[in-house]
Image (spheres, rainbow, N blue to C red):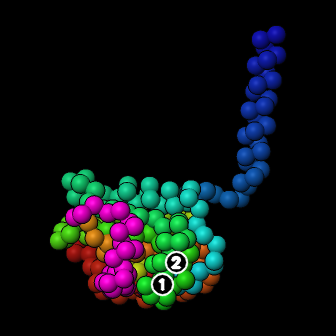
């Protein structure tokens, strides 16, 4: 009886193996390096979005990837606010209708006031978010213009709704949503990255 059972289990395992082979026939799995390289090279700043909002689960993934960035002495000197609330989004848009590029959602990045290292930490967090969003077929663009938008006196009430600690200030935003354009890559100046042998 035991022997029959073993042969039966082996048969199922073999069938599963064959199925796997069949499904991936001729497709060598891309290496981890290739997947990461392709993701980096295919990311673009997106400035036209479909109206569909990003889900809470998607935002949660993006934030989790963001906060897994390295930070100096693991101090994690950042505050991040993902805005799903459409009333708040409307208030932010009302400050300046153009800056957000029509994105359905924003992620606000805040750094410790007066800290250069804090801003570096935020940059690393941001790139994690941009790359993960690209891997999830979401579009993003960093919005440095947000820093100017929130200088407006009427922005005070909006900023208060971010619930930031006293010693943190928003430094820029990230637009997030489903892309409604596929821009070409912008040129890079390879002479700025030099290998010294
Ligand atoms: C710190 C920072 C601020 C930026 N601010 C804006 C902005 O306010 N509006 C905008 O449309 N793009 C903004 N961008 C996007 C850049 O224009 C974009 O990254 C650059 O042109 C390269 O294009 P790519 O991201 O498609 O490779 C910003 C990017 C960075 C890193």
x then y, percent, for residue 24: 71, 54
Callout 2 crowding tier (Cα within 10 Å): few <14, some 14–19, many ≥20: few
What is the tally of numbered marks visible in this picture?
2
Residue 90's label in the rendered image is 2
Is residue 182 among the parts visible in the rendering? Answer: no
Q: In this picture, is 84 found above or below 149?
A: above
Quadrant position of the C terminus in the picture = bottom left
x then y, percent, for residue 111: 27, 67
Farthest residue, direction top: 1
> SS for tag 1?
helix
| Residue tagged 1 | 94
Farthest residue, direction left: 114
Q: CA distance from mark 1 to mark 2?
A: 6 Å
* Residue 165 counted in the magenta span: yes
* The image quadrant in which ligand 1 is located: bottom left
x then y, percent, for residue 107: 44, 69
* Residue 4 counted in the magenta span: no
The answer as to whether callout 1 falls within 8 Å of ligand 1 is no
Quadrant position of the N terminus in the picture = top right
Is residue 114 toward the left or the right of residue 21 in the image?
Answer: left
The residue under the point 73% across, 48% down is 21
Is residue 77 toward the left or the right of residue 56 in the image?
Answer: left
x then y, percent, for residue 120: 26, 68
Q: In this picture, is 153 found above or below 130?
A: below
Task: Give the magenta part as a residue range.
Answer: 144-167
Would you identify the image quadrant in which residue 7 lies? top right
Viewer-side residue, 147 vs 90: 90
Would you identify the image quadrant in which residue 79 lies? bottom left
Residue 35's label in the rendered image is none
Viewer-side residue, 18 vs 132: 132
Viewer-side residue, 22 vs 79: 79
């Amino acid at each position: 009886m035991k022997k029959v059972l073993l042969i039966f289990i082996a048969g199922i395992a073999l069938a599963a193996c064959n199925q796997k082979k069949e499904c991936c026939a001729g497709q060598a799995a891309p290496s981890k390096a290739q997947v990461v390289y392709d993701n980096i090279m295919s990311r673009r700043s997106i400035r036209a979005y479909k109206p569909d909002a990003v889900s809470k689960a998607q935002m949660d993934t993006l934030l989790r990837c963001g906060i897994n960035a390295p930070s100096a002495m693991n101090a994690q000197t950042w505050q991040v606010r993902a805005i799903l609330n459409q009333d708040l989004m409307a208030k932010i848009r009302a400050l300046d209708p153009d800056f957000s590029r029509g994105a359905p959602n924003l992620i606000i990045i805040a750094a410790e006031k007066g800290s250069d290292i804090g801003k570096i930490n935020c940059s690393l967090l941001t790139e994690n978010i941009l790359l993960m969003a690209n891997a999830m077929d979401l579009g993003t663009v960093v919005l440095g213009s947000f820093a100017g938008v929130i200088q407006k006196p009427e922005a005070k009430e909006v900023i208060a709704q971010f619930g930031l600690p006293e010693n943190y200030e928003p430094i820029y935003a990230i637009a997030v949503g489903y892309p409604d354009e596929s821009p070409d890559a912008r040129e890079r100046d390879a002479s700025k990255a030099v290998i010294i042998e």
